Amino acid sequence: MDENEFWTIVEEARAGLGDDRDNGEALAEALVQRLVAGPADIIAGFGRRLDRLHDALYRWDVWAAAYLIGGGCSDDSFMDFRAGVIALGREWYERVLASPDALADHPVIRRAAAEEDDEAVFAEAMLYADGKAMEQLTGDEHAYDNILDEAGQDPGRDPFADPAGEDFDFDDDAEMHRRLPRLAALYLPA
């Protein structure tokens, strides 16, 4: 599946959510319903593209944004955050790739900062939409893994590799203000 097809599916699912369109968990459920229409190769292609887009966000500056927004961020939570960025749609995904500090402009982030909501943009369920859809389509909880095994899995990012970019101290407020000035202004005391 190419990137345009992937984003078309995401945007179709988001469009059906109305006011809930920025809720990653709701989007994951809508994606399952959209993907379960099959066929299985579309679901598998969606999953492979999701993995590639998810891996592209595996960067220190994106993790720093997640750290600010989440009031801290473990490696597991960072997976959920990257899935949540994808759930925001293509425009926001591309903006975050260009500069994670752009998230300071997203209404969900601005509202979350004002309400001290540290769960905005974290969407673990997005990571499992393809597998759930495959299971519903086939009735086999292992069908997705079997299809990927048969097709030859894309090795993707080395799971033991460090994130891309320059590591820095997320607990250094001055450094966070320097690297992510707009997000830091929302989340860190002056």
Image (spheres, rainbow, N blue to C red):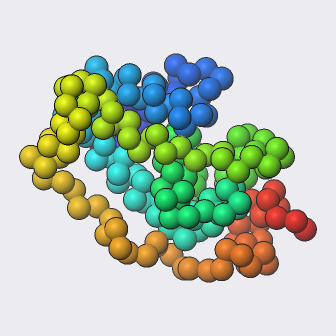
Q: Looking at the image, which is closer to me, 97 or 76?
A: 76
Q: Give the residue drawn at x 62%, y 80%.
A: 168
Q: Looking at the image, which is closer to me, 57 or 32?
A: 32
Q: Give the residue drawn at x 71%, y 76%.
A: 171
Residue 65 in picture, x, y percent from top left: 64, 61
Residue 74 in picture, x, y percent from top left: 56, 64
Asked whether, in this view, residue 88 is left or right of residue 120, the answer is left
Asked whether, in this view, residue 175 is left or right of residue 57, the answer is right
Asked whether, in this view, residue 28 is left or right of residue 170, the answer is left
Q: Give the residue drawn at x 37%, y 46%.
A: 50
Asked whether, in this view, residue 160 is left or right of residue 165, the answer is left
Q: How many numbered circles are shown?
A: 0
Say if residue 101 shows up in the picture.
Answer: no
Say if residue 26 shows up in the picture.
Answer: yes
Q: Quadrant of the N terminus?
A: top left
Q: Give the residue drawn at x 54%, y 37%.
A: 24
Q: Quadrant of the C terminus?
A: bottom right
Residue 103 in picture, x, y percent from top left: 67, 52
Q: Looking at the image, which is closer to me, 185 or 187?
A: 187
Q: Residue furthest left?
A: 150
